[in-house]
Amino acid sequence: MKSIAEQRILVYNSLSGTKEEFKPLNGNMVGMYVCGPTVYNNVHLGNCRTFISFDIIFRYLKHLGYKVRYVRNITDAGHLENDADEGEDRITKKARIEEIEPMEVVQKYTVDFHRTLAKFNTLPPSIEPTATGHIVEQIELAKQILESGFAYEVNGSVYFDVLKFNESSAYGKLSGRKLKDMIHNTRETSGQSEKRNPQDFALWKKAQPEHIMRWPSPWGDGFPGWHLECTAMSTKYLGKKFDIHGGGMDLKFPHHECEIAQGEAVSNCSPANYWVHANMLTLNGKKMAKSTGNNILPNEIFTGENDIMERPFSPTVTRFFMLQAHYRSVLDFSNDAMLASEKGFSKLMQALSLLDSINTDTETTGFDVTKWKQKCYDAMNDDFNTPILIATLFDAAKFAQNVNDGRESITKEDLNTLQSTFHSFIHDVLGLSKEVQGVDHYLEDALHLLIELRNDARKRKDFVTSDKIRDELSKAGIILKDGSHETTFTLRQ
Ligand code: AMP
Ligand code: ZN
């Protein structure tokens, strides 16, 4: 088998429309930026699919030994109701409806987002910057774009000049659109908007008197345009050019197209080398979306309080359901699909237990373990193909069953390789953990908090506290197990 450093990864780059060999810009360091949620509502399962898809990429690159800086932002200002820079700010609107402060909305739904993703066992990003925390950087960036001649100011707002940009670069190259077709298909009558051309987008918007989320700027009180924050924050934490930029497919246009234009306007280079887009989760064949109400919330699945599922499903089974599809395929959520995933997941966990319990003293192996292990890597190297990886894990599960039934044999050394590979792909790469029977979700949240507090104490070298938490939990029958990436727990039966 090739060494980990020799694994050759192919990544589908939406910009070129082909799979390309992954070559990080700086040796074994990888910079990855993923557009995070707009925190004005509970995250739905579709949002979670996208974040789980990038969690897999993050985990796999780390597993291979890359040092990954994963930046995922929180959009807490500037995202208007409609993509054409019109309408109310989504967060302000929610604050008005709920009669609370905009920042209370942000706090409430950021907490929900973190709790939900933790239930799905996604790893936290390395940096999670917010738009409101980077107003200074966004104003600076708008100034630079103005200076470069690709933007203009009108009446306290600053707009990106798409026609001008298109003279030296192709606006629309990521989404495969042509500016002349966009112009042809626009019905807006000229003169109604202060933009020079309807394709232009806001870098900074003047705040009307009723607009609460406002900041002083060289152009008067206002707020940043939605696309500006990602360019400002990715540049700040990853540089003008970095490796991977990701998000859901629906962000290709206009959001990512505008990010490319902003980046090129100030630094003459496209911000990211690989543009990676996760496909949509659908419900009843239609995209899950907050705005249409065609969605299901993760908690509704875990508690069973919904009209779609015949019973509750756990976060791990739901995660497994997502991983059974490739991230670039559309995936439809249904009761039948979840039932099938639950069965599949349970079979995989049985295989894990069986593998761990096998004892062997034979001298031959009827299975090429080295080849099988490379097949697991090949699956992930081919654009992070989790369904192929899962199928390959099942090949080993079948073999383990045959060994257990006395139809096949395996040497001790091969068994060790099989066990450790199986474990690391299931736990470290796929982020799946054995369901702990008898623990409800409230208790699970509390246990995760205790694990976090213990790990914080260990980092501080406060071993009195960390040992106390571990020992007291153990007395209560809860056993902590430290893995290479995370601490898990089991119940003493
Ligand atoms: P938002 O909070 O609406 O900005 O969305 C957060 C992330 O979820 C973005 O990357 C979206 O592309 C993604 N997303 C939204 N709807 C879906 C869906 N139905 N399936 C998968 N990803 C989605
Ligand atoms: Zn973004």
Image (cartoon, rainbow, N blue to C red):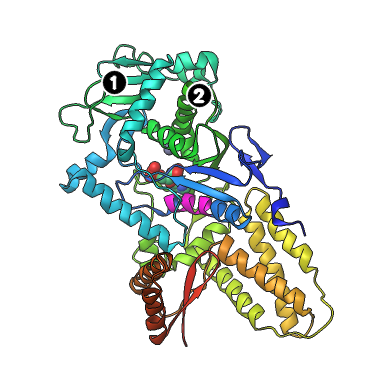
Q: Nearer the viewer, residue 91 or 138?
A: 138
User: What's the residue type where badge 1 is placed?
Assistant: Ser
Q: Which residue is mark 1?
A: 157
Q: Which numbered marker is on residue 267?
A: 2
Residue 13 quadrant: top right
Q: Nearer the viewer, residue 371 or 82?
A: 371
Q: Residues within 10 Å of mark 2 (few under 14, many from 20)?
A: some
Residue at left 28%, top 25%? Answer: 205
Residue 220 quadrant: top left
Q: Quadrant of the N terminus?
A: bottom right
Residue at the far front: name it.
461
Q: Which residues are magenta?
A: 47-55
Q: Residues within 10 Å of mark 1 (few under 14, many from 20)?
A: many
54 in the magenta segment: yes
Instruction: Determine the quadrant in which ligand 2 lies.
Output: top left
Report the predominant secondary structure element of the magenta stretch. helix
Residue at left 62%, top 75%? Answer: 352
Dots 2 and 1: beta carbons under 8 Å? no
User: What's the residue type where badge 2 is placed?
Assistant: Ser
